[in-house]
């Protein structure tokens, strides 16, 4: 039996919960980051923040593989969810992480928040159905 808490191991060698989708990119880190951000913007998403976690690590005197966390969303989809349950705002905006396990293994990680918003916050599934489209946008960004 598999649950959301089940750990999965990708070819990168790093375990992650089953709720995390981890896509392998066919291009390098910076090209992947550009593709992801461009695809999100082209689909009407607002980029709220682009956090360079490896730069933050460097500023703290340590190191981290190239890693960027992008916070994004569309207030037309997120606002009704937060109106339905203000606590659901903890899950928003949406997040995608681009990171390099190695020079030839670049990953795009994200969560599909729809099921969590419904299960954890009681948001009607019809209100979160559109969130599933994010996976298609990110997958298409890596093909082009």
Image (cartoon, grey):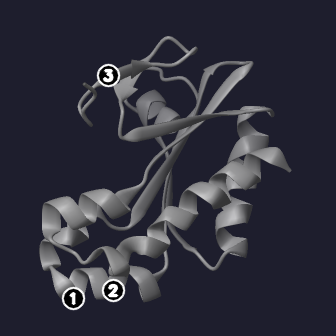
Foreground disc of the pair 3, 2: 3
Instruction: Report the residue marked by disc 2.
Output: 79
Instruction: Report the residue marked by disc 3.
Output: 7
Quadrant in which residue 101 is drawn? top right
Instruction: Report the residue marked by disc 1.
Output: 83
What's the mark number on residue 20? none
Residue 14 location (% of width, % of height): 44, 16
User: Can residue 34 be seen by looking at this rendering?
Assistant: no
Q: Secondary structure at mark 1?
A: helix
Sequence-wise, the earlier of marks 1 and 3 is 3
Residue 36 location (% of width, % of height): 68, 54
Residue at 58 percent across and 75 percent down: it is: 45
Distance between mark 3 and mark 2 Cα atoms: 32 Å
Residue at 55 percent across and 62 percent down: it is: 134
Residue at 51 percent across and 19 percent down: it is: 10
Q: Is residue 13 above or below residue 75?
A: above
**Are dots 1 and 2 in contact, CB under 8 Å?**
yes
Q: Residue furthest right?
A: 144
């Amino acid at each position: 039996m598999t649950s959301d808490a089940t750990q999965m191991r990708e070819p990168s060698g790093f375990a992650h919960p089953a709720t995390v989708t981890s896509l392998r990119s066919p291009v390098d880190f910076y090209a992947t980051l550009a593709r992801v951000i461009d695809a999100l913007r082209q689909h009407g998403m607002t980029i709220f923040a682009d956090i360079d976690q490896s730069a933050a690590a460097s500023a703290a005197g340590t190191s981290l593989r190239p890693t960027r966390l992008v916070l994004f969303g569309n207030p037309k989809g997120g606002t009704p969810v937060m109106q339905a349950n203000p606590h659901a705002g903890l899950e928003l905006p949406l997040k995608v992480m681009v990171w390099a396990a190695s020079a030839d293994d670049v990953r795009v990680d994200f969560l599909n928040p729809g099921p969590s918003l419904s299960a954890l916050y009681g948001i009607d599934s019809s209100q979160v159905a559109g969130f599933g489209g994010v996976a298609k946008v990110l997958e298409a960004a890596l093909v082009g």
